[in-house]
Image (cartoon, rainbow, N blue to C red):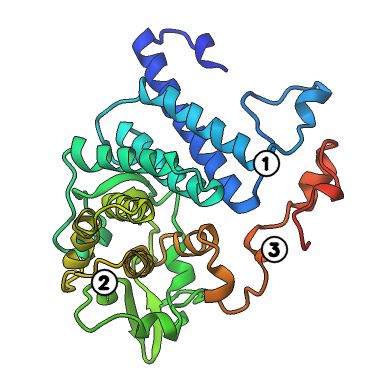
Amino acid sequence: DRIPHVDDLTDAQASEFLGELYFLRALAHFDLVRLYGGIPLRTGPVTPEESSLNVGRSSVEAVYQQIFADLEFAESRITASIIRGKASLAAVHALKARASLYFYNHSQTGSYLDTAIQASTAVINNFGLSLEADFAYLFSGSNNSESVFEIEFNEQDRNRMGEYFFPTDLSGRYEFAPTENFVDAFSTADQRLDASIAFSGTEPYSIKYNDIETGTDNIYVFRLAEMHLIRAEANALKGAPAEDILTDLNAVRERAGLLPATSTNLDVLLADIEDQRWKEFAFEGHRWFDLVRTQRAVDVLEGVEHINQTLFPIPLNEILANDAIDNNDQNPGY
């Protein structure tokens, strides 16, 4: 809204900034819709008019269509260069791939599997990215060949994840910890275990975020391994030839130190893809949403006993502040 009023911007700069902003809006709407379901869609700044202050919930379908429209707008404007901490064309394709897979899970519309495959393939093939040979290197704080988009932190803008994961004897709060079930799920050959988890005595804790002193650990939003597993899952859901699925699945398995999968049974392959996502992206914010989108949260997670629990409640302050939303709009079960 304000870019046309910024002095001394060239047309090229304005176009690129708009591309970044539309991508960020798509990302924000995506995160909101997978947390709450339908949300008020806001595509402009709030003004004092009642129609602007009070916006009702749009459907999940409408939110996703806005996400895809924003990504299409961004795609023709955003930079193709991957710069650490900055949105780029690769990030646009990555979000399109992820959102397409999620929306397929919601709608069962097969064309979104095709979009997920096309978008993930663009990230894999077009930007010079490659899987790092050493999984632990991804969490060393160094630039790497696998990062698509990450949030940068520094000593002034701290990441507090390490503080919440580290045990109290290492100056942490230990409010989140790996379960015994998760630790036991790794084979001894899997390099991701020692790169993801350490032990204080017998207590396991996550070490993907390990700069507890200054909080400078970056957080991945998208990295290349996810694109391989999205393409594998979409191909499996489409019933593609097993060799197409195995190529991507085994790229992730073999980097982890595991033997390649060989099954040609699609159900077995989908189960393996879910398992690899669990271990590959531990503590990176994927597991809950993976189980929710595939409707497996009730079956897998202790304490999740009803599908109503897979959406968060609409916050009371939103209901009180927005006259277009009332208690009748609350998510089921709350």
Report how far apart the C-alphas of labels 3 and 1 lie in the structure: 16 Å
Q: Going from the N terminus, do you reach mark 3 or mark 1 first?
A: 1
* Label 1 Cα crowd, 10 Å radius (few <14 / some 14-19 / many 20+): many
**Residue at the disc numbered 3:** 308
Front one among 317 and 105: 105
Badge nearest the viewer, 3 or 1? 3
Which residue position is annotated with label 2? Answer: 192
Give the spatial CA distance, label 1 vs label 2: 36 Å
Residue at image x 30%, y 36%? 90
Are circles 2 and 3 on residues that touch, CB within 8 Å? no
Q: Quadrant of the N terminus?
A: top right
Residue that appears at 26% across and 28% down: 80
Q: Nearer the viewer, residue 273 or 114?
A: 114
Which secondary structure, mark 1?
loop
Mark number for residue 39? 1
Question: At label 1, which amino acid type do we have?
Answer: Ile
